[in-house]
Amino acid sequence: MTFDFGPAEVFVIRYRGRLPDARVLGALADLIAADTVRLLDILVVSRDGGGAVEVIEIDDLPAGSPFDAFELEARGITGNEDVERIADDLAPGASAAIAVIEQLWAKSLAERFAESGAQLLETVRIPAPELNAIAVAANIE
């Protein structure tokens, strides 16, 4: 069995200002270049100092933005309800990037599960800060 897409995760990154730090986008570009992930969709939700909300698609940004390096593979997959929920939680002057990232390394694994009749019942992501705190508490180096 062949899937068009492998497992994907939605990352919501909150930060100050209108656009994410170029280092964050650079790290994502590095993962894409290494064929570790594929960027399916990304947009920015921004709340200005007066409280007005703006949704920024990467096509709406002027040429030369850090987003120029990205080609979206499933534009529009981010749901409006996600955007609204995230916008409601933003303080004035804050923004959030919503990125749908396909885990290419897991695509063939998902295909093999499906071919064999196996069912993936659950996955749980442990954020890096939590995993590192757990490792410190357990004296794992």
Image (cartoon, rainbow, N blue to C red):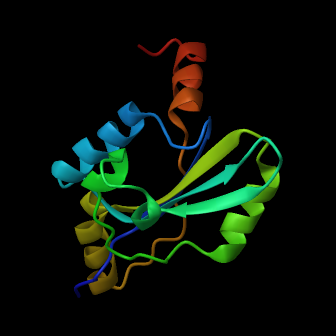
Q: Residue at x 80, y 50 (%)?
A: 89
Residue at image coords 28%, 82%: 4
Residue 27 or 129: which is nearer the viewer? 27
Quarter of the figure with the C terminus: top left
The location of residue 140, given as percent across then percent down, is 46, 16
In the image, 132 versus 97, the foreground residue is 97
Rendered image quadrant of residue 27: top left
Q: Is residue 43 above or below residue 17?
A: below
Q: Which residue is more in the foreground, 5 or 87?
A: 87
Tag count: 0
Left or right of 119 on screen, residue 113:
left
Q: Nearer the viewer, residue 104 or 17?
A: 17
Which of the image's four quarters has the N terminus?
bottom left
Please give the name of the residue rendered at 73% of the width and 58% of the height, measured from the top-left corner: 53
Left or right: 31, with 122 as reference point = left
Q: Position of residue 6 (x, y in %)?
A: 33, 71
Which residue is located at x 36 percent, y 47 percent? 65
* Residue with the most extreme front position: 62
Q: Residue 13's x, y, as percent?
A: 57, 44
Residue 16: where, in percent of width, then height? 63, 34
